[in-house]
Amino acid sequence: MIQVTTVSSFSIYIQTEDNRIDTSVASTQIRHLIKWINDMDGSIRYTYGNTETIYDRYTHLGFSYNINPNVYEGKTNLLPAGYWKYEVYEVSWIGTVTVSSGNAPITENDVLSPAADTKGVVQGLVTKGKMYLAEKDGTQQVQYTQREAPSSTNYIYYGQ
């Protein structure tokens, strides 16, 4: 399970190469579209990583927090805190990889037309899992104040 904190940039390391779908192109022609699904309210968010490096056994993706999320730039605003499911979709290009509007699919069902080598194609789901998004210290919705224990007994007597 991935564990991150709200209102901060984060990196994830996930297995994608063992489930790779389009093996006809080099790994430099692959990007991954992440679908985030909130367990509590069912809201869905999409994003590509702002950095992505595919290694032999895993993929490293970086994301940055931004109040104004941007799917193509890896800017996310995953709130509320709690558990999020994630699904990772493989997107491949034949020509130049450009993660931008009109060149990269925005959802797993998006088909860009007219077809071109510079437009990405969603190949399918390569991995999925859960992420826990913890609230940043001091920003919790419910905050508790720790009090010192009394030095004497702390009994309440009534009815005498």
Image (cartoon, rainbow, N blue to C red):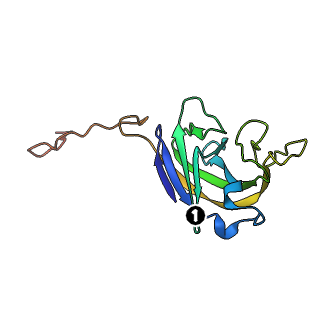
Picture coordinates of residue 119, whole percent (x, y): 80, 45
Picture coordinates of residue 158, whole percent (x, y): 20, 39
- How many numbered marks, from 0 up? 1
- 50 versus 127 height, above or below: above
Image quarter of residue 156 = top left
- 29 versus 106 height, above or below: below
- 102 versus 30 height, above or below: above
Q: Nearer the viewer, residue 143 or 96?
A: 96
Query: In the visual, does 123 lie left or right of 46?
Result: right
Amino acid type, callout 1: Tyr
Picture coordinates of residue 57, whole percent (x, y): 58, 68
Query: Which residue is rendered at x = 54% and y = 53% of the image?
Result: 131
The answer to whether one can see residue 50 in this image is yes
The answer to whether one can see residue 89 in this image is no
Query: In the visual, does 64 lie left or right of 152?
Result: right
Picture coordinates of residue 55, whole percent (x, y): 57, 63
Query: Which residue is rendered at x = 75% and y = 45% of the image?
Result: 107
Residue labelled with disc 1:
55
Q: Residue furthest right?
A: 114
